[in-house]
Structures are given as C-alpha cells and as structure tokens.
Image: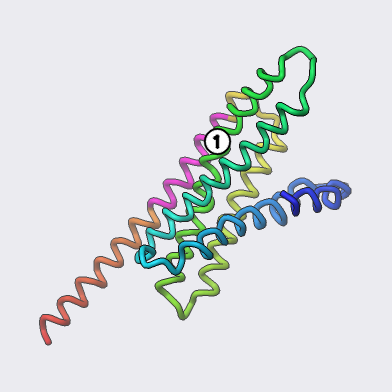
Amino acid sequence: GLLNTLFVPLFAALPVGGLVLFFFLVVGPVEETVKWLAVRVFAYDAPSFDAVVDGVVYGAVAGLGFAAIENLGYIVQTSLLVTGGEFSPLQYTVGTATQRAFVGPGHVIYSAFAGYYLGLAKFNPGQRGPIVVKGLLVAALIHGFYNTVVSTLPLTPLGFIGFVVLYDALWLGILYRKLRRYESLYSVAQNRLSLGSERL
C-alpha cells in the first residue's frame, strides 16, 4: 500500500497511459511479490512443501490472506470517508464489500500461479532463478491486465461481474491444465524410474 501510494502521483502525471503503466509496473509486481514472499519466507523450507502442487496451495492461501486484508482496508476506508449524501455510510460500505468480494478470487488465482512456479523452482534447483522470475512475471501481468480492464473500461455492474467470472475462470482453467500436465509428466518419469530399478 505504501509503495502504491508513493508511485501514484508519478504515473498520474503522465499524459497518456499513466494508469495502465502504474498497474503493470507497480501494482501487479509489488502485490504479487509481497504474496510470493509470504510463501517463500514462511512455507518454502517447510517439510510439508514436498510437491509442486504445494506451491499452488500456499500461493493461493497467501492470496486469500492478502485479499482479506486489502478488502478490509477498502471497507473501513469507505465507511470512514462517507458522510451524508443520498446513501447512508452503511449502504456505501455494503456496496464496497460486495464489489470487493469479486476481487478476492483474482488475488488467490494470481498468487497460485506464482506459487506453481515457485514449486517448480524448488524441485528444479538448476533453473530456480528463471523459473521464479517467470512465475512472478506471469502473476504480475495477469494482475495488471485485470486492473487495467476494470479501471479503464466503462463496465456496468453486470458487465463487471461477467468479466471477473470469465477472467478468473480462464486463468483458473489454465492453471488446472498446467497442474494436470505436470502431474502427467511426473507420473511418466516415476514409472520410468520404477521400471529401471526393477531391471536392476
């Protein structure tokens, strides 16, 4: 939040595309790195992190925690700022909470992607750095594109809900395919190893 607030004026001053650049160069990378760090610092070296899918699970949980804290911040901020007007502060607060409920799953999915690549990196130490960077870039780009669409296009409430559901479903489907492909390749490798040991 501190970094986002610090950089907003710099990008807002740009005549064209400042908001889009802000989402892709600051919001996406900063937020995804924070969530990634939670997994890297607290779960990566744990004995229970013993499969690639654990990276997905821990990443998703980090995203869920991040979304809960961020959403609470927005809800509290709304309830404190709104005074008088056509609607009561409670109505604005409920509206903010409802809108933010659709944002949370995205945070879970984006950080699950970074967690997937962190899991791959753990079990491919020779390529750890590039794999981790790829995971963070993928998560940040997905995040930045989401923010750009919902912040720059004139979406109706129904259009917003439709976009969020389709966008999250798309990336969740891609992540599921990646996990299935990895599981399939891992099973083939395990079968080859067991056949080789039987021959010995």
- x then y, percent, for residue 100: 60, 33
Which residue is found at the position 46% from the left and 70% from the top? 121
Viewer-proximal residue among 195 and 51: 51
Q: Is residue 28 left or right of residue 123?
A: right
Magenta-drawn stretch, dominant element (helix, strand or loop) = helix
- x then y, percent, for residue 34: 61, 57
Q: Is residue 135 above or below residue 112?
A: below
Viewer-proximal residue among 177 and 115: 115
Q: Is residue 175 magenta?
A: yes
User: What is the crowding at mark 1: few (fewer than 14 residues within 10 Å), some, or many (at least 20)?
Assistant: some
Task: Please tell me in which quadrant of the rendered image residue 164 appears.
Answer: top right
Q: Is residue 62 magenta?
A: no
Which residue is found at the position 84% from the left and 46% from the top? 12
Which residue is found at the position 37% from the left and 58% from the top? 53
Name the amino acid type tagged 1: Val
Which residue is found at the position 75% from the left and 51% from the top? 2
- x then y, percent, for residue 125: 45, 78
Q: Is residue 193 left or right of residue 94?
A: left
Residue identified by numbered label 1: 164
Q: Which residues are magenta?
A: 161-176
**Quadrant (top left/top right/bottom left/bottom right) for the C terminus:** bottom left
Q: How is the image coloured?
A: rainbow
Q: Is residue 114 above or below residue 132?
A: above
- x then y, percent, for residue 132: 53, 68
Label 1 residue SS = helix
Viewer-proximal residue among 200 and 41: 41
Q: Is residue 122 above or below residue 24?
A: below
